[in-house]
Amino acid sequence: MRALLIYPLFPPTFWSYEKILELVGRKVLLPPLGLITVAGILPQEWEFKLVDRNVRNVREDEWDWADVVIISGMIVQRDDMVENIKAAKAHGKLVAVGGPFATSVPDEVKNAGADFLILDEGEITLPMFVEALERGERQGIIRAEEKPDVTTTPIPRYDLLELDAYDSMSVQFSRGCPFQCEFCDIIVLYGRKPRTKDPAQLLKELDYLYELGWRRSVFMVDDNFIGNKRNVKLLLKELKVWQAEHKYPFRFNTEASIDLADDQEMMDLMVECYFDAVFLGIETPDEESLEFTKKFQNTRNSLADSVDKIIKAGLRPMAGFIIGFDGEKQGAGDRIVRFAEQTAIPTTTFAMLQALPNTALWHRLKRENRLLDESKGNINQTTLMNFVPTRPLEDIANEYVEAFWELYDPHGYLDRNYRCFLKLGAPKCKAPAKLPSLVDLKALAIVVWRQGFKRDTRWRFWHHAFGILRHNPAVFEHYITLCAHNEHFMQYREIVRQEIGEQLKDYLNNQQQEQVVPSLVTTAEKGEKVLAS
């Protein structure tokens, strides 16, 4: 079989980082780890070609070459996924679709024309798909009740990627999360019992990346890296040795729950393995909202103190925030801004709450008849809520836009970044010194010119840069990289304000029309009664 693997386009999002990637001559932040894992699971006598639509379009000769087209993606990639299913069918191809979006909303994928729906986790369902093809079947829905043992997962086919297009690589150690946050679809897709690979298994994946010549950052894509703390520590102890033996070729970052701050040994091990950043799902500083959405792990200790511990350990925090929880009090957006300023978290993704398909939140809102569209809902930052909130949607949307705008004010961002890096723990790894590339030097020159000369941030830029060089020089390179991120956020806050504003305008117009129609009906009924009398 000749299998054409297609990864759909992402719309502009908080994480797309277009302006930053332009500076360093790359096209995409991360590769499609799911699809290259699919290629590793399928029979290796098959031939594979992979097209990441975020890098380039599918060529006509690639459509002609393929026996089967396999597409996978997330909810936020919905529109382009549907278009590519239709394009594949227009070329007369057998189409198989899987991944989080297809698993969450299978009907939409099927209605677009997909022949096979390969749902749930591929270690179980992909061999079933191959067996169906061998029996001569041309369509079907393939599901699995149980969760696979990920120690059987083969090494992803990193060789299929156009490596130069990506800023960072992805690896996965675990699936699942032990917590029960009402809005989260991770526990729906992967369960609440974190399943981990063997340390040696993950090191083989890193060996392969090293052999392919990769020498940049690696994102550990686990939704909660520390979900199984025992196994993670076993990995980190071996990874620490591997990194030292290979002279620290990779910098790592990942996602973890806030209780990471309670485990000093874990943080120390991560920093010793050359982890330098971690994404934290903080969601909101409002304890009532955290309890209502069942994010109890965020209520056990002071959130501000926890963030401070993580920074001082040497891990730069990124944080996720959400507005629009049930029972939320007015001013939630302002409280999030004040918390980010208090804790000096430079990078804060921020969105209005969405009811993702099949989550506990989705089921509750469905029972309460509050879902606006059962099939919709994504995690893009330019999307209005897909359910009726407990306070006026226009209040939430306006607070959201104002908070996003303030969080990424260029002056405020530089100040927050500076305060974070002043107290950021120094790296514990000593990678060999290397000369910067011409691309990196050009990117640095552009950032220095824009922020240090051209804009009115010039005083802050130079004050803060010399302050870091004086007080915490070991983190200076990392600090300058985060200054560059300001280029993306300045533009993206404009996108958020414009798109949310347009959607809110349409929403309010629809609300007015819905109010006008009943009043017209009432007037007509009164007129009929007058005529009848």
Image: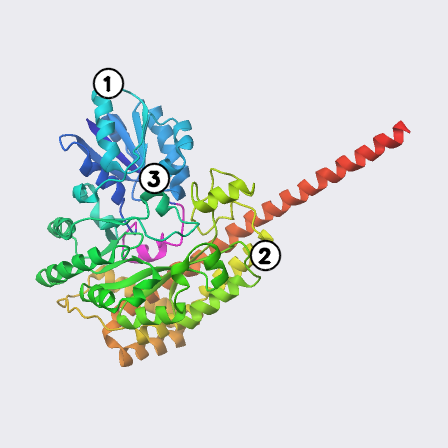
On screen, residue 63 versus residue 109, left or right, reads left
In the rendered image, which quarter is residue 531 located in?
top right
Chain part drawn in magenta: 11-28
Above-or-below relation of 313 to 237: below
Percent x, y of residue 170: 24, 50
Q: Is residue 446 visible?
A: no
Which quarter shows the N terminus?
A: top left
Q: Which mark is residue 136?
A: 1
Query: At numbered mark 3, what does the secondary structure look like: helix, strand or loop?
Result: loop
Residue 396's disc number: none
Name the kind of residue labelled 2 in the image.
Asp
Residue type beneath disc 3? Pro
Residue at label 3?
8
For image coordinates 14% across by 68% down, the residue present is: 433
Instruction: Give the amino acid at mark 1.
Output: Gly
For disc 2, the marked residue is 395
Q: Main secondary structure of the magenta part?
A: loop
Q: Earlier in the sequence, mark 2 or mark 1?
A: 1
Closer to us: 11 or 338:
338
Measuring from the top left, give residue 471's x and y in whole percent: 28, 80
Q: Residues within 10 Å of mark 1 (few under 14, many from 20)?
A: few
